[in-house]
Image: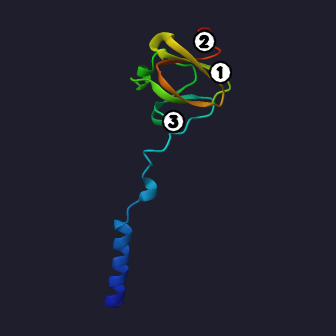
Amino acid sequence: MSVMRRGAVLAAALVLVAAPAAAAVPDRGAAQPCAIEHFCLYSRGQQEGAMASYTKGTRDTALQNLPKGGWSAWNRTSEYWCLWTKPDYEGTKYGLNPGDKFDFTAIRSLLPSSDFRC
């Protein structure tokens, strides 16, 4: 192999090794996926930030790493969900229909309509 050809092959290999793997880096600003038949609560508006996923609800979102509550939600279940602004199902109560997305003031507890407290 000629010196010039070896130099070109080496240069091409260095470009491939040094090239950033942009496709492998997740987009931190993108919304996290919400699984079907889950109620997802997000730490920021517009379904962004840390996410907690529920099938049975919670008395306090702080137990799922949302200490300040959830500020947006996506109801991917087939049930209506009840949402409260305080832990233990207290405070102002809101509701979210199946399939809906919504931005709130902080939600701290939630339950599906099948639960007697909803």
The alpha-carbon separation of the residues under discs 3 and 2 comes to 23 Å
Mark nearer the N terminus (1 vs 3): 3
The alpha-carbon separation of the residues under discs 2 and 1 comes to 9 Å
Q: Mark number for residue 47?
A: 3
Q: Position of residue 68 (x, y in %)?
A: 40, 24
Mark nearer the N terminus (2 vs 1): 1
For disc 1, the marked residue is 80
Q: Amino acid at mark 2?
A: Cys
For disc 2, the marked residue is 118
Residue found 46% across the figure and 14% down from its top: 86
Q: Position of residue 6 (x, y in %)?
A: 34, 84
Q: Position of residue 16 (x, y in %)?
A: 39, 69
Split into 4 quadrants, where in the image is the C terminus?
A: top right
Occupied quadrant, residue 34:
top right
Split into 4 quadrants, where in the image is the N terminus?
A: bottom left
- Looking at the image, residue 94 sits to the left or right of residue 14; the answer is right
Residue found 58% across the figure and 35% down from its top: 35
SS category of the residue bearing label 2: loop
Check if mark 2's residue and mark 1's residue have beta carbons within 8 Å.
yes
Residue found 50% across the figure and 41% down from its top: 31
SS category of the residue bearing label 3: loop
Q: Amino acid at mark 1?
A: Tyr
Q: Mark number for residue 96?
A: none
